[in-house]
Amino acid sequence: MLIVLIMPIVQIILFGFAITTEVRNAKVAVFDPSCDIETQRIKQRIDASSYFTIAQNLTDYNQINDVFKKGKINIVVVFSKDFANNLLHTGDAAIQIVADGSEPNQASTQVGYLSQIFASYQQELLEQYHVPFRIVPNTKMLYNPQRKDAYNFVPGVMGIIMILICAMMTSIAIVREKELGTMEILLASPIKPIYIIFAKMIPYMVLSLVNLTTILLLSIFVLGVPPGNLFWLVIISILFIFLSLSLGLLISTLVSTQAAAMLSSAMGLLVPTLLLSGIIFPIESMPVILQDISVIVPARWYITAIRKLMIQGVDVQYVLKEFAILSIFAVILMTVSLKKFKIRLM
């Protein structure tokens, strides 16, 4: 009844509101060395649009890399010196748009929207002064100048594979033991229940590590994706694998059949991972309630960390937030799962 009645409601809400390629509420940083009347008007246009919000004003051009690494900004607008003077006297003024190329599709959409705002303002100046003003933005894609799609989908694929193999397979394996009646036999032996549980989880940990190695080798040597900070990438991937195994264990304590375990894993983990983790659709463009729900989707934080470590090549200090959140999730899930498992079977 839960699947038949509740799941369609959840799916229609997720697919109706989460699936969108539009840009909404993208955070913009501005570097404006001239601070003249024309740049102020353009900034007001950007901030007044439903697509962008000016979240930060930079005082130094060298701050651009830092704001992207910290994940606080989606795109940066850079005005040239003496912007208004150049525009009114020569008819030309330079604007640079700096985008995060680690998400090339989203970055291209944001650049297109900003270019439309600049073109609209240019047209208004032309009608007002009857002078052929030109505001031609120069686009720069950080971390992915070739705009390769592999830079975007590799972190997402890593998150999906870990969820599928670890959570789904672990839950099905443990529930199968319950259905066959062999779990009770094992629990009646002198072996402690926690050892039995970990013995069931270890094979999927090994399989996940093999898959992680395969994905990294293919990504680096076949797809040409940079390895970035490889050491910490592997460390946080191992943490996410452990978290996914804990999710599988938790699911096994809530259901009693393999079919229910598979459906719970697929609908409860795979769909939110696809729609609410930022793999395909930007989280900023979703309704606020879905943005809040996405906070409890572990894959969101893992994929964000992988993009920073692998594509941007940042130091571990820039992913401490994601590392801490995943660690808290892992500890809570494992603790709750073990406690429920013991109460249920002993």
Image: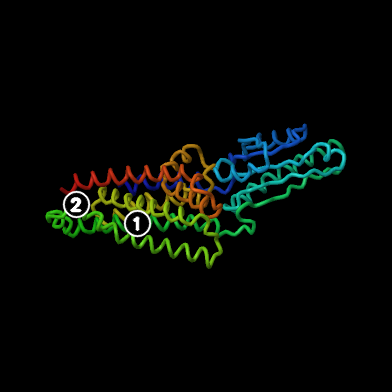
Check disc 1: other Cα within 10 Å, few if <14, some if 14-19, many if 20+: many
346 horizontally vs 270: left or right: left
Image height of 110 relative to 202, above or below: above
Indicate the secondary structure of the residue bearing disc 1: helix
Give me the residue at 32% from left, 56% from top.
262
Structure colour scheme:
rainbow
Indicate the secondary structure of the residue bearing disc 2: helix
Place of residue 141 in the rendered image (x, y in percent of width and height, measured from the top left): 65, 52
Residue 193: which disc? 2
Q: Amino acid at mark 1?
A: Cys
Q: Amino acid at mark 2?
A: Pro
Image height of 52 relative to 224, above or below: above
Pick whichever, 114 or 266, lies toward us: 114
Judging by the rendered image, the residue that carries numbered circle 1 is 166
Distance between mark 2 and mark 1 Cα atoms: 20 Å
65 horizontally vs 33: left or right: left
Give me the residue at 32% from left, 60% from top.
204
Q: Spot the residue most to the bottom.
A: 222
Quadrant position of residue 183: bottom left
